[in-house]
Amino acid sequence: MRVSHVSGVLDATTLDESFDREEGFDLERFWTAWAKAHAASRGCLEVRGMASSDVIQQLKRGLAQHIDPVHAGDADAVSQEVTLSFDSLEQARGCLLAYGNAIKVLAPKALRLSIEDFAEQICSMYRGGSPRDS
């Protein structure tokens, strides 16, 4: 059986086709086992950041599968600490760069430095230098 993340579904069409499950198939048991195996196979990069409460709401919508609701900060605070989980540094960097200066990475340091490096390369390019000119 194939499992797909709902976030990856862009469109769906109802077909007249059907399928048969194996006799004795237990969806709950299958899903529990699949989720446990999937979690064990993934890398896990925990990211701590600071963001305004309105940005936290955007993060909850845009990065719902990554945000830890337990560590999403105090809704009444102007700036809140948030904890996000990603499979890798590259995935975290790509997702968080889209938010520009709306979220500040506190940890891990490697991600913070990587985002800073990307930002410097972009600024340099738009100011007329090559990405590596400093």
Image (cartoon, rainbow, N blue to C red):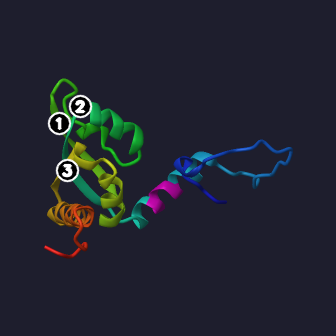
Residue at coordinates 23% horizontally, 31% vertically from top-left? 53
Please name whichever residue, 118 or 28, is drawn nearer the observer in this view of the structure.
118
Q: Distance between the residues labelled 2 and 1?
A: 6 Å
Residue at coordinates 21% horizontally, 66% vertically from top-left? 124
Q: Which amino acid does label 3 sit on?
A: Arg
**Label 1 belongs to which residue?**
80
Q: Is residue 78 left or right of residue 34?
A: left
Q: Is label 1 in a helix, a strand or a loop?
A: strand
Q: Distance between the residues labelled 1 and 3?
A: 10 Å
Q: Earlier in the sequence, mark 2 or mark 1?
A: 2
Q: Is residue 47 left or right of residue 62?
A: left
Q: How crowded is mark 3: few (under 14 residues within 10 Å), some or many (20 or more)?
A: some
For residue 48, the mark is: 3
Q: Are marks 2 and 1 in contact (CB under 8 Å)?
A: yes
Magenta segment boundaries in residue numbering: 33-38
**Label 2 belongs to which residue?**
53
Whether residue 37 is in magenta: the answer is yes
